[in-house]
Image (cartoon, rainbow, N blue to C red):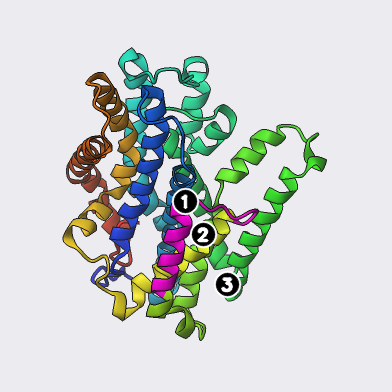
Amino acid sequence: MAANRDLKLYFPNLNGLRFIAAFFVIINHTEQLKVFYHLGDGILSDFTRNIGKLGVMLFFVLSGFLITYLLITEERLTGAIHTKKFYIRRFLRILPVYVLLIVVVFFMLHNFSFWDIPRMKNPLDNNFISILFLHIFLIPNVATAVYGFIPYIAQAWSIGTEEQSYLMWPVLLKKFKKHRLALMISIVVFHFMVRVLFSHKLFIAIPFRDVIYKFWMHFNIDSIAIGSVFAILLCNKNRGLKYLLNTNLFYFVVFFTGTLLILGVRIPYFQYQFYSFLFGLIIINLAVNKELKNVLEYKVLNYLGKISYGIYMYHFIVLIPVLMFVSNINLENNILIYSLVLSTTIAISSLSYHYFESFFLKRKIKYSYIKSGEL
């Protein structure tokens, strides 16, 4: 069946939510790195420790919701999920900025001492080739598990998690067409069981146990699956939606989640699954609850959400010179720091989107059956 490129899929508010997720990550990295420039009191709050990874979980849940909904809608429109075209669309969206960042970090920034973070060991100094190849082969989360925090490109671990998950996604959705909801719930349960098993003392003797455990802790396919659960419920017009799509419930969940985030509350064993479920409730209400259609629908938020992939990927490169500058002028001021980081990152991301990414995004149309937002 020919692609119906006149059909457009758009959920309100979700662009704004993308920017909020990116901003969570910026807060985490900024507060962590201020310590290395003698800015702040050197103590990270529980809020700061939690917010970065949870920002990425929000990205994952949102991505799982959107992509699963899009694939099922494509199937209903054309009669099939077109796996090859899905992969091409993903690569056209993700790879250009990802590859550009690899080139900039490995072959430019790493060669100039100006970009060194004081008192921080850089794994690239002794493991350049192996880390480079792990990134080239789209397994940066393995690099993180083996070598730890890698300056300027540490955020790329999440790209590895997403793309490895989405290599399986269309195949799984086709294979388990009649049991998709059960499939997603099984993924969540399986991820939890593996994590518990590898954290148990009985498994200490397993070769590379620590590396496998660190990889699994960053391979948050369960959060993607939780987002997919909400997409499947929506696609199937599940009876439970009448309880989930509730304005009062939405505001309660937002208040409850916000309170937990501010207090830095950690949930033993179920930290990311718990927050991912709350994020899923927020996402589905923002997306389809008509009473909430304008909550985040502002031009500025929409635009920032549209360029949020760049904001997420480029902010680290901006962060170091800003912290260095503020430290050198001996003017510690969070308003100044965040204003400089955000304004510069947004400017770079905007230029990247309009003059670099858009070249590839336009070519996504050829492989699309539905016009959609920035997935």
- Can see residue 93? yes
Secondary-structure class at tag 1: helix
- Can see residue 171? no
* Amino acid type of the residue tagged 3 in the rendering: Leu
Q: Position of residue 8 (x, y in %)?
A: 27, 70
Q: Disc 3 vs disc 1: Cβ atoms closer than 8 Å? A: no
* Amino acid type of the residue tagged 1 in the rendering: Leu
Q: Where is residue 165 in the image (x, y as percent from the top left)?
A: 52, 52
Examine the structure image and report whether residue 330 is included in the region drawn in magenta. no
Secondary-structure class at tag 3: helix
* Magenta segment, prevailing SS (helix, strand or loop): helix
Q: Residue at x 39, y 36 (%)?
A: 31
Is 132 drawn above or below residue 291 in the view shown? Answer: above
Instruction: Specify whether 280 is left or right of 315.
Output: right
Sequence-first disc among 3 and 1? 1
Q: Where residue 181 is drawn, which disc sits there?
A: 3
Image quadrant holding the N terminus, namely bottom left
Q: Where residue 275 is drawn, which disc sits there?
A: 2
